[in-house]
Amino acid sequence: MIIDGGALTAEIPPLTVPQLVRQNASRYVDRTAIVDAPTGRSYSYSELDRLIGRFAAGLAALGFRPREVLLLFTPNQPEWLIAALGAMSAGGVVSGANSHYGAAELEHQMREVAARFVLTTPALLGVVQEAVSKLSCVTILLTGDAPGTVSFASLIASTAPEPAVSADIDARASVPFSSGTSGLPKGVILTHRSLIANLLQYRQVRESPDEFVWLAYLPLFHIYGFTFSIYGLAFGGTLVTLPRFEPQTFLAAIERHRVTHLSVVPPVVQFLAMHPLVDSYDISSLLQIGCGAAPLGGDLERRACERLKCPVEQGFGMTESSAVITAPYPGRARTGSCGQLLPGTSARIVDPVTQTDVERGVAGELWFRGPQAFKGYLNNPETTARTITPEGWVCTGDVGYFDDDGYLFITDRLKELIKVKGFQVAPAELEALLLTHPAVLDAAVIGRSDARSGEVPVAFVVAREPIDAAGLKDWVARRVIDYKHLHAVIFCESIPKSAAGKILRRLLRAQDAERATA
């Protein structure tokens, strides 16, 4: 029961990601490549090409070597993309970290990737300094000036020769972090080949106009924002960088820069479909909106399409697929569906118990195979072996079905991760944190459906001494990033567990549903 997405007609070129971008930059030269929405700074393709080369030269002169990792800890801005492409041009690997991380979370990622170089901003310098204080031999690159750091400006002013590195398309290019299928965040190994393959697969399905403008508000540390930004630069688009989603600045950027293409997550579709503020801005330049990272209801999809008078369509992907597995083909979108398989991609729907294929229309775990597939989890061979079968199938952990026409519908997921606004939250991480509180005897965390965020974390807690729910929520909030904040705390007498000691989350979900009904 293998479902096939057809042939990839384009040959994957023997180029690295920055080589593809810089080669195509020679075709566009004076066209605007990147505009920074808050400041208005802009760079042509010829300027982008030069800055990538200068950053690579300056970085190499500092001692950065092929296969080393540059960790990027900044909000979306042109420097993020210049540095990423520059580091890869020097033969290195890039790993983006969530710019809302605290020092402990940043330190964890830096240790995992063995980063000796980190790029950040003056506003985040304190977090970086705290994180690197527990590490050794880390060079801080700064989009500003401060003692003990190397300025971004000095790197791009370097007169050193650009390093000559081999064009190994099977070398590591990026290590984004994903919660994957087993809990705590882990590095996903992506090569130049897998990333470029995904760009070509998507381009074959959704070839963009000769000139298009894409709003780069999705976090660049996330595979969704990263891959689509590279797609824009590889094929002549103009990227408008925005540090974060804020309603007025988001709409103002679309209006001012005449944005033609948006990639969004369901809460933003809901905003565009329903918020009265949208009517105060001219966003008629929009030609197409793609939605991903979490399922989008068909009714909301239709409502947004009607209000904005442009297609609003959803696709499906994951970090482990370099971004995209299915997408809507032009003129063939089906409401509520995630589209059809990209060219060069095969898929199966497998019974999670018997590991055998099920019939079309029957839900099971989605497995996929294609040139965009990741190479494994960093420093984690056991999880890699559980996720990638000997035949090369990637077990996504997502549950869905294909209809008779090959459209994918995602219905659920096997993994216990909670998906908040497209970000994955591991219950085990929050449970481990809760158990360090002196008043908590036992705890379990589940996801509760939420119209705005998709899901929100809810904690069931057995208290060993009196504590109020608000106080415990605040205690957790001071220790984790915002999307991991607890939405609710429910006190109970015990946590239901199996004989093997595993938390029976399905019983907790049922209890939570009963409480909501009551």
Image (cartoon, grey):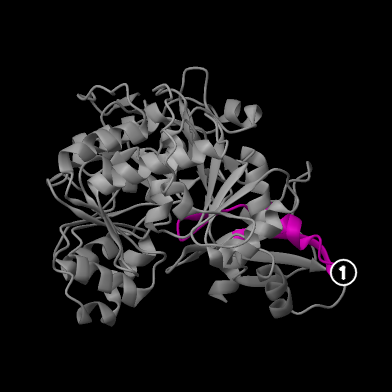
Q: Residue visible at 32% across and 32% down? A: 19
Start and end of the magenta stretch? 418-446
Q: Nearer the viewer, residue 188 or 89?
A: 89
- Would residue 430 be counted in the magenta stretch? yes
Query: Where in the figure is residue 352, as x and y percent of width and height?
Result: 52, 33
Q: Quadrant of the C terminus?
A: bottom right
Q: Is residue 459 left or right of residue 44?
A: right
Q: From the image, tell me which residue sits under label 1.
A: 464
Instruction: Please say whether residue 323 is visible from this viewpoint.
Output: no
Q: Residue visible at 45% across and 54% down? A: 153
Is residue 100 depicted above or below 385 in this figure?
below
Q: Residue visible at 68% across and 73% down? A: 473
Q: Is residue 269 left or right of residue 480?
A: left
Query: Where in the figure is residue 221, as x and y percent of width and height?
Result: 47, 50
Q: Residue visible at 28% across and 53% down? A: 336
Query: Where in the figure is residue 83, as x and y percent of width and height?
Result: 44, 46
- Would residue 189 be counted in the magenta stretch? no
